[in-house]
Amino acid sequence: MLLVAGQCVALLSVPVEHRPTGVGSTQEGCSLRIAWQANTEPDVAGYRLHYGPSSHHYLCTIDVGNSTSALVGDLARGMRYYFAVTAYDSTGNESLFSNEVSGVAGVDVSTVAELQPEEYVVAALHEGDQYYVDRSYQIVEIPDAFEGLLWIKTKNDHKFDPQLQVRFSLLRRVRLFVAHDSRVSTPAWLSGNFTRTTFAIRVSDAGNTDFRLWESTRQYQPGETVILGENGSASAGSMYVVLLRVESEASDLQPHISRSGTDLVLSWDALPDAQYYRVYRGEHPYFDPESPCAVVSGTEFVDEGAAAVAGRYYVIEAVRGAGQEPLRRRVGTLGVRLEVGRNLVSVPLQAQDDQLKSLLGQVLTGGANALVADRVMKWHGSSYEIAWLVSGTGTPYDGEWLNEAGSAVSTMTLTRGEGFWAEVRKGHQPATLQFFGEVPTDSAHAVEIEPGLNLIGSCYPVSMPLTATGLWEQGVAKGATNSREADRIMAWMGDHYEVAWLVDGTGTPYDGKWLNATGSDTSHLRLEPGKGYWLHIRSGQQPRTWKCPNPFPGR
């Protein structure tokens, strides 16, 4: 039996179980070669290769005849494509899809010019590649977001050269990454110009060595010369390698998400080279876009009835001409429940406007004066800035947020990574703050931390364990052997605080861990999206910048 246009018809020679098998892919420049095992049935007339940029969503089909391989060209550099094959007979009956394979199209190595030292090699990054030009170590694991990127393969023998400089010029706009051996101390040039991510490449050296990925704090422009320094150790370790992600030079989508009654409305700026737009929908902010919920030619999509969902996220994708990679932006909405009393809150998304009226609107209950109105309080190190919502006055101020004295409209702003109090007065009803904005895709978000008490929030709309925040690794928070001296995080539970404190200096595996208030067990506290927390930095420390790492950078 073969599946044909959704129906089953009799075909003895090519049954369903004899769909094409053994499909595989190899890379050739800016193309991908797909090969598969031939069917054994005598009346197979040919094969069709189906592919597209999403899993099991094939936009293109090539009839390759009796061939059992095909070179698919004109693919976007660095983009992953998904492939499957069907067999057909002379009467047009077609088999089910084969197993699916995927591959990343080639990267233009001409992005890098004047590379020094000359023996270094520019290539596309894939598992199984030789890691160094002078060693047989292979790459055994690459995070999905980095496979297929352009990379510079260095020389292991250069690891002891204190004068070494990796130098090259650029012909395209790029973001740089450095894969640096975790066994080697981090050099100043790396920590000063790059941010450590949560990702790593694993290499078959000494039991799959962890080479941690650092991301440049800025884009590098065409014509710019990049100079990188020594490895960071004069006696041990392996040489780093360099990764490059080519950044789009096209105009941006500039997406926007808002609520209209019970619907969510997505809109974006039109791109002159866009053929059409795809919209994907998911429940996780960093979901993998597979099957679009809509394909539109305009610049708006309305998700009917979606406003009632507590958390909903979208990927808007502009599909452009041949050879150009699609442009993607993520937006979403997240609801935060506010109970009567004080609630510690933070902004979980990158909002388009950080003013109170735009962020909070009139979801809370206002009043004619500051003593009865719901209010917001933002901590400034030694005192609160307060704003309250006006209603019931019959004046143009109804619906506005005023400063504490009521003398002017509040200029308070609320940004990602900051915590604040939202107080629902007694007698008022609980409320849900609905945040709208872009899903952050940066590798890290910077928050200034002062000695003493800091109100912080989750910088990304995902739950994050305290050990993944980088507070200890970056030296922002200091640990101690006891809870009285250690820096700590406090979560407001509505009527009490739950406390976690940082351990260090014990010489045990607990160093770098967060314990509960009594120290009897590791803390289960996490930074939850939309929630706020106190970070207590004990006296004697200097102000620091916390670079909260994104668990899903570049998605």
Image (cartoon, rainbow, N blue to C red):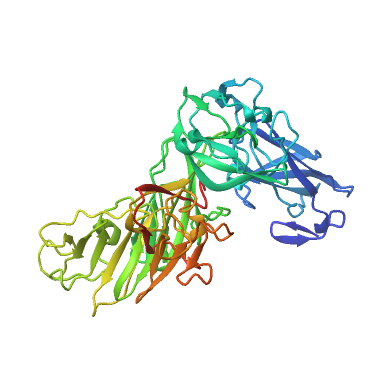
Q: Quadrant of residue 203?
A: top right
Q: Position of residue 251 (x, y in %)?
A: 41, 36
Image quarter where the N terminus lies is: bottom right
State the residue in front, 100 or 499.
Answer: 499
| Picture layout, residue 539 above or below residue 318 | below
**Residue at point 24% right, 58% down?**
382
Report whether residue 217 is seen.
no
Q: Quadrant of residue 111?
A: top right
**Residue at point 41% right, 66% down?**
305
| Picture layout, residue 342 above or below residue 141 | below
State the residue in front, 53 or 49.
Answer: 53
**Residue at point 73% right, 42% down?**
204
Report whether residue 426 is seen.
yes
- How many labels, in total? 0
Q: Quadrant of residue 537?
A: bottom left
Q: Position of residue 170 (x, y in %)?
A: 51, 25
| Picture layout, residue 446 above or below residue 258 | above
Q: Position of residue 402 (x, y in %)?
A: 16, 60
Q: Position of residue 26 (x, y in %)?
A: 73, 38
Quick check: 286 left or right of 11? left
